[in-house]
Image (cartoon, coloured by chain):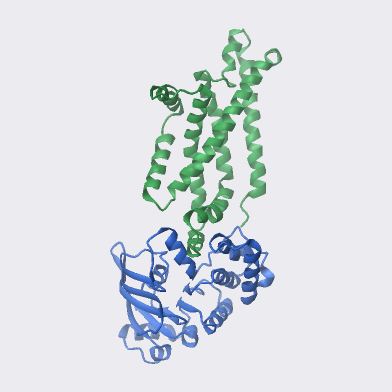
C-alpha cells in the first residue's frame, strides 16, 4: 500500500531460526499516525516482525528505516533509536523490584536524562492517563494483569516515542481485563499515535486500525483496510484463518 | 585453656591474619566476580570468551596449585610482592570464579523480558545490567555468595604454608612449645568458627533486608 508520510519502512527483510524461514522478504511501510494491525496464525512470524522493528530480533538481510534513519546494528545509536520506538510486550515485563512510578520514571532518568522530580511528574500524568494514578507506589506484583499492561503502556509513552509497537498486548490477560487495555490503546489511536499492533483482537482491528496486515508462513499475504479484509479476504489462507477465529 | 591464655597474642595475630586475608580476598573476589559475570552475559563475544576462560581455568585448578603458581611463578616474571599480597591475589581470583557463577545463576533467574523491556526503552547494556538485572539477581544470590566467602575464609589456611601469618599456621609454633595438639586445634577451630559464623550472620541480615520480595 502506498503511504504518504512513512515512519517505519521495512524492505526485503529476511530472518531464519535455524532451518525455519520466519521472515520472507518482508516489505512493509507504516505511515505517521497510522495504526497497523498484524494478524495471522501462530508461527506466522508476526511477533518476530514486530520485535525486528526495534531490533530485539536481529535480521539477516534487508533494511529497516525509522523516520528516515536506518536502524543501527548495535551500540549507542541503536539505543537512541529504540527510545523513539516504544514496545509493549505480551508478558508486560515490568521491573519487579521497582514501584509502578519508578518503572515509568527509570528510563526517562537514564535515557532522556530528566531530573527525578520532572520524570516523576511526567510519570504521574501518564499513570493518570491510563487510570492508575492511585497505584503509583505499589509494586507490579500487587496489580492485576490489565493494570500491569497499562503501566507498561505508560512506561513506553514516557519516552515520548514516535511510534509504539504492541506484541500481543492482551494475549496474557483474563477476558475481563482485555477491554481496559484495548480502551487505552483506542484512545492512543484517536490521539494520533503511530502504532503497530500484533493481536488476535479482531474487534480492535476493525474499530481502531487503518490497515490490517495478514501474515502466514513468514510472508505478508494481505495488506488492506480492515473492513475490506474482514468482509472479503482475497487469499485462501486468510479466508481459512478468519473462518477459524470468527466462528466463535 | 592454658594454650589460649598463655599464647593469646600468637592466636590473636593468627586470627587477625586470617581476618585480613578473608576481608581483602573477599573484596577482590566480589569485584572480579562481578566484572566476570558482566563479561559472561555481555553482548560482545570476546568478553564472553574471556569470562568463560577465566572461570574455567580458576574453578578447575586446585587452590594449592594456584598458590604455587602465584608465589613461585609471578616472581619469575619480575613481579615480586609480599606473600600476603600474593595470597590475597590467589584466594581472590580463585573465589571470583565461584562468585561469578553464583551471580550468573542469579542473572538467569531474572525474567529475560525485563532486560528486553529495558533495552526496548533505549537503555544501554550496562544500564540494563546495573539498574534492572543485577539488583534482582543480587537478592537471589546472597545465600550462595555467603557460602563462597565462608569457603574462602577456610581456604585461607593454605596461605600458612607459604609463610603468611594466619590462624592455622599458629599450630606449628604451639606444638613446638609442647602444648597439647588437641587443644591447640580446638582453639584454632574456635577462631575459624568466629569468622565463619560472623560471615553467616552478616549474610543472614543481608538476606532479611534485601531478600527476594516478589
Q: Is residue B171 left or right of residue A89?
A: right
Indicate the quadrant where residue B60 lies.
Answer: top left
Q: Confirm whether residue A198 shows in the render.
A: no
Is residue A172 visible to the viewer in this orientation of the structure?
Answer: yes
Front residue of A238/A210: it is: A210
Q: Give the residue at x 57% y 79%.
A: A184
| Residue B135 horizontal/vertical position (percent) | 57, 52
The N terminus of chain A, quarter of image: bottom left
Chain A colour? blue
Give percent across and percent down for residue A80.
Answer: 46, 64
Specify the colour of chain B.
green
In depth, the one of A68 and A230 nearer the eye is A68
Q: Residue at x 70, y 12 (%)?
A: B6
Q: How many marks?
A: 0
Q: Is residue A123 above or below residue B16?
A: below
Q: Where does residue A107 sit, x and y in percent of width and height?
A: 55, 62
- Residue at x-position 38% and y-position 84%: A3
Q: Is residue B183 left or right of residue A75?
A: right
Q: Is residue A203 left or right of residue B135?
A: left
Q: Is residue A24 above or below residue A211?
A: above
Q: Return the x and y of residue B9 as percentages of the image width and height.
A: 67, 16
Tell me: residue A207, above or below residue A56: below
Q: Which one is in front, B135 or A82?
A: A82
Report whether A107 appears left or right of B59: right
Amino acid at each position: 500500500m502506498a503511504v504518504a508520510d512513512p515512519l517505519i519502512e521495512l524492505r526485503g527483510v529476511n530472518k531464519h531460526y535455524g532451518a525455519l524461514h520466519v521472515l520472507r522478504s518482508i516489505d512493509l511501510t507504516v505511515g505517521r499516525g497510522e495504526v497497523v494491525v498484524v494478524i495471522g496464525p501462530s508461527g506466522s512470524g508476526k511477533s518476530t516482525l514486530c520485535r525486528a522493528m526495534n531490533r530485539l530480533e536481529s535480521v539477516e538481510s534487508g533494511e529497516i528505516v525509522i523516520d528516515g534513519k536506518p536502524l543501527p546494528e548495535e551500540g549507542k545509536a541503536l539505543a537512541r533509536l529504540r527510545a523513539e520506538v516504544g514496545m509493549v510486550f505480551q508478558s508486560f515485563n515490568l521491573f519487579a523490584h521497582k514501584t509502578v512510578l519508578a518503572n515509568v520514571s527509570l528510563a526517562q532518568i537514564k535515557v532522556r536524562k530528566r531530573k527525578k522530580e520532572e520524570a516523576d511528574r511526567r510519570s504521574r500524568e501518564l499513570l493518570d492517563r491510563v487510570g492508575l494514578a492511585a497505584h503509583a507506589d505499589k509494586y507490579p506484583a500487587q496489580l492485576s494483569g490489565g493494570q500491569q499492561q497499562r503501566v507498561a503502556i505508560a512506561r513506553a509513552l514516557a519516552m515520548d516515542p514516535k511510534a509504539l509497537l504492541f506484541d500481543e498486548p492482551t494475549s496474557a490477560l483474563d477476558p475481563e481485563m482485555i477491554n481496559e487495555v484495548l480502551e487505552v490503546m483506542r484512545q492512543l489511536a484517536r490521539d494520533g499515535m503511530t502504532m503497530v499492533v500484533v493481536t488476535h483482537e479482531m474487534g480492535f482491528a476493525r474499530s481502531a486500525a487503518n490497515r490490517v496486515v495478514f501474515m502466514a508462513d513468514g510472508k505478508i499475504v494481505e495488506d488492506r483496510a480492515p473492513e475490506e479484509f474482514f468482509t472479503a479476504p482475497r487469499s485462501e489462507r486468510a479466508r481459512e484463518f478468519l473462518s477459524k477465529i470468527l466462528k466463535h | 585453656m592454658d594454650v589460649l591464655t598463655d599464647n593469646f597474642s600468637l592466636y590473636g595475630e593468627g586470627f587477625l591474619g586470617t581476618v585480613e586475608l578473608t576481608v581483602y580476598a573477599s573484596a577482590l573476589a566480589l569485584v572480579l566476580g562481578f566484572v566476570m559475570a558482566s563479561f559472561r552475559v555481555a553482548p560482545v563475544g570476546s568478553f564472553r570468551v574471556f569470562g568463560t576462560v577465566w572461570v574455567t581455568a580458576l574453578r578447575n585448578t586446585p587452590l594449592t596449585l594456584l598458590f604455587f603458581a602465584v608465589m613461585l611463578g609471578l616472581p619469575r616474571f619480575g613481579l615480586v610482592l609480599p606473600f600476603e599480597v600474593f595470597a590475597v591475589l590467589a584466594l581472590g581470583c580463585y573465589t571470583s570464579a565461584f562468585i561469578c557463577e553464583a551471580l550468573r545463576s542469579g542473572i538467569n533467574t531474572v525474567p529475560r523480558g525485563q532486560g528486553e523491556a529495558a533495552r526496548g526503552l533505549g537503555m544501554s547494556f550496562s544500564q540494563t545490567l546495573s539498574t534492572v538485572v543485577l539488583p534482582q539477581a543480587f537478592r537471589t544470590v546472597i545465600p550462595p555468595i555467603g557460602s563462597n566467602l565462608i569457603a574462602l575464609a577456610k581456604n585461607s589456611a593454605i596461605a600458612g604454608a607459604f609463610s603468611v601469618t594466619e590462624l592455622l599456621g599458629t599450630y606449628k609454633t604451639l606444638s613446638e612449645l609442647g602444648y597439647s595438639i588437641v587443644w591447640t586445634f580446638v582453639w584454632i577451630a574456635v577462631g575459624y568458627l568466629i569468622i565463619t559464623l560472623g560471615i553467616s550472620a552478616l549474610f543472614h541480615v543481608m538476606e532479611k533486608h534485601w531478600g527476594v520480595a516478589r
